[in-house]
Image: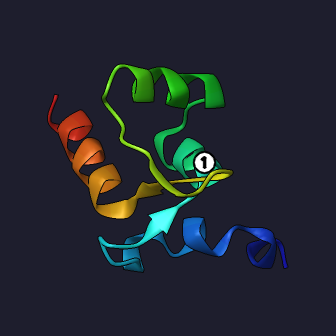
Amino acid sequence: MLRNSINPALRDFDQLPNSQHVRLPVVKAILGISSATVWRMVKAKQLKTHKFTERTTTFNVGELRALLATKAEG
């Protein structure tokens, strides 16, 4: 039953296409970091945001996978 309460984008991250966009809670969970750290990474240009509206910020799945791959290498 707990499985149903997990964000579908987080639960199915491996199956999402690289063109998909996810919100901040998924990024935090995937990277295991806090909101503040996500925004520090954005400011340092380590993460790129995509604005769909003035109040909707997303992150690209393909870019997150590339970041994860570089973290795994080094």
Name the residue at 65% across, 50% down. 25
Query: Colour mode?
Result: rainbow
Q: Which of 36 and 45 is in front in this view?
A: 45
- Residue 38 x, y percent position in the rendering: 52, 31
Instruction: Please tell me in which quadrant of the rendered image residue 73 appears.
Output: top left
Instruction: Please tell me in which quadrant of the rendered image residue 3 appears.
Output: bottom right
Name the residue beneath numbered marker 1. 24
Quadrant location of the N terminus in the rendered image: bottom right
- Residue 30 x, y percent position in the rendering: 50, 49
Q: Nearer the viewer, residue 1 or 25?
A: 25
Residue 45, compared with residue 52, is above or below; it is above
Q: Residue at the left extreme?
A: 73
Name the residue at 31% across, 30% down. 46
Amino acid at dot 1:
Leu
Q: Residue at the front extreme?
A: 54
- Residue 11 x, y percent position in the rendering: 58, 71
- Residue 13 x, y percent position in the rendering: 46, 69
Q: Residues within 10 Å of mark 1 (few under 14, many from 20)?
A: some
Q: In this view, does 73 lie to the left or right of 45?
A: left
Q: Is residue 37 left or right of residue 19?
A: right
Quadrant location of the C terminus in the rendered image: top left
Q: Total number of numbered labels? A: 1
Name the residue at 53% across, 27% down. 39
Residue 37, compared with residue 8, is above or below; it is above
